[in-house]
Image: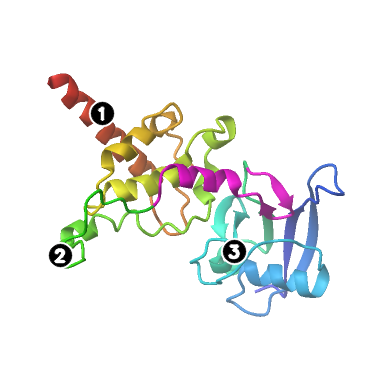
Amino acid sequence: MPKEVTFVIQRFDPDRDKAPYFKTYSVPWERKDLTVLDGLYYILENVDGSLAFRASCRGAICGSCAMHINGKHRLACNTLVSRLGSDKVTIRPLSHLKIEKDLCVEMKPFWEKFEFVKPYLMPGSPPPPSGERVQTQDQREELNIVIDCIQCGCCFSACPVTLTSKEYLGPAALLKLDRFVRDSRDGAGQERLNLADGLYGAFRCHNVFNCQCCPKDLDPPRSIAHIKRRIMGIKLLGRGK
């Protein structure tokens, strides 16, 4: 194990810089469990206090430290330098979003897409006498493939359509929509599918599969395909009538 690892970080301060540029730092590599986030904190605290990045939980739960690391979208907090296969770590901010400073981006467009798909339970009926909307084990297991999204933005950043079509809902929002379409307790399935059936909904997806980069191993293309099948099934049934 080398004694140092080189961090090459994209820097940009819109108040001072005309364009992004890369700056190189050396970070001591004294532990096998050194993470990219550890390296960033070392730089911030010991080398360059002007470096800007986001982080919070350090447990791959909050999603705030998502960034582009050595050619892949990852969480800095659980990305071990030893597993990158190189003693050089190249870091860029998430793509397709305005850079606020260095590795911090403006997440407003991302959250607007989430708000649009109404990411909350809408039962559509009064609660039962017990006050609990019961699910069977099979119904709950149906959610396992979609429920762990931490809204990190990796799939949104990786998707080329979110760059070329700013109104496109994007893979993260569509996965979240699918999470509630699959929920047996939700009564707004048709309303949700109508939201996904618009010009910038599920059918705007170009099937590039770049969004298969989820740090929680979720599969946005599967959710988008499921939404498309549900929409087309409803339309075919309507024609049959």
Task: Categorize mark 1 by other alpha carbons within 10 Å: few (<14), some (14-19), many (20+).
Answer: few
Instruction: Residue 118: say if magenta.
Output: yes
Q: In the rendered image, which residue does mark 3 sit on?
A: 76
Q: In the rendered image, which residue does mark 2 sit on?
A: 129
Where is 143 relative to 220, above or below?
below
Look at the image and tell me whether residue 211 can be seen: no
Q: Earlier in the sequence, mark 3 or mark 1?
A: 3
Where is 167 relative to 101, above or below?
above
Q: Position of residue 69 (x, y in %)?
A: 62, 55
Residue nearest the viewer, comparing 195 with 1: 195
Q: Position of residue 78 (x, y in %)?
A: 54, 68
Instruction: Give the secondary structure at mark 1.
Output: helix
Instruction: Give the secondary structure at mark 2.
Output: loop
Look at the image and tell me whether residue 116 can be seen: yes
Q: Would you identify the image quadrant in which residue 79 lies?
A: bottom right
Q: Are circles 2 and 3 on residues that touch, CB within 8 Å? A: no
Q: Amino acid at mark 1?
A: Met
Q: Amino acid at mark 2?
A: Pro
Residue nearest the viewer, comparing 27 with 206: 206
Q: Earlier in the sequence, mark 1 or mark 2?
A: 2
